[in-house]
Image (cartoon, rainbow, N blue to C red):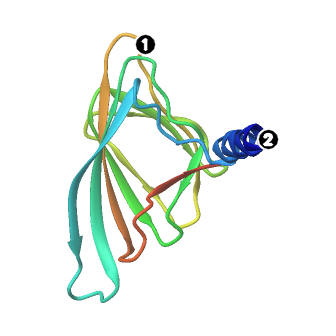
Amino acid sequence: MKRLISAAAAALAITVSLAAPAPAHDAERESVTPKFAQPIDNIPGKTMRVVEVNYAPGAASLPHTHAPSAFIYAYVLSGEVESKVNDGEVRRYKAGESWFEAPGAIHSVSRNASTTAPAKLLAVFVVDTDETKLTTPVK
């Protein structure tokens, strides 16, 4: 009986782990580092969150969306990043260039444009203060 219960528990654990959403970022090829979080005093219920995304050569994020309330300003710090938001074209952004993502946008392409050099971007989010999960993979 104990073996049957153990086997059922193991099967349930495997099922739950397979059903969980995959992360939108591959930690071995890219890193996402929180840099700043501050409530916006004159906009009650809103917080500014800033993350730095470092892409290894050839690295890419999985297609994803961001927190439902998120307004995002992305700024390339170094290298070149290719990005596609919603039905727009894939665009290449060089260091010093930027783009905007509105709430509900689907970010289907986000990758280092180079296979030999790293790339880095800063993403500035304005989100509802209670939203702490900034990125969700798209299935």
The reply to whether dot 1 and dot 2 touch (C-beta < 8 Å) is no
**Can you name the residue that lies furthest to the top here?**
116
User: Which residue is disc 1 drawn over?
Assistant: 115
Disc 2 residue crowd, few under 14, some 14–19, many 20+, Cα 10 Å: few
Q: Is 21 on the left or on the right of 39, as rendered? A: right
Instruction: Kindly state the secondary structure of the residue where label 1 is placed.
Output: loop
Q: Quadrant of the N terminus?
A: top right
Give the answer, above or below, for where 38 lies relative to 62. below
Does residue 58 show up?
A: yes
Q: Earlier in the sequence, mark 1 or mark 2?
A: 2
Q: Secondary structure at mark 2?
A: helix
* Residue 63 placement (x, y as % from top left): 60, 42
Q: What residue appears at the point 36 percent right and 57 percent down from the top-left corner? A: 73
Residue 103 image offset from top left, x and y in percent: 52, 67
| Residue type pointed to by label 1 | Thr
Q: Decide: is 62 above or below 133.
A: above
Few, some or many residues within 10 Å of mark 1 (<14, 14–19, 20+): few
- State how far apart marks 1 and 2 are (Cα): 50 Å
Q: Position of residue 26 (x, y in %)?
A: 47, 31
Q: Is residue 25 above or below residue 71?
A: above
Depth check: 14 or 34 in front?
A: 14
Residue linked to disc 2: 4
Mark 1 or 2, closer to the camera? 2
Quarter where residue 55 is shown: top left
Q: Which label is found at residue 55?
A: none
Badge 2 amino acid: Leu
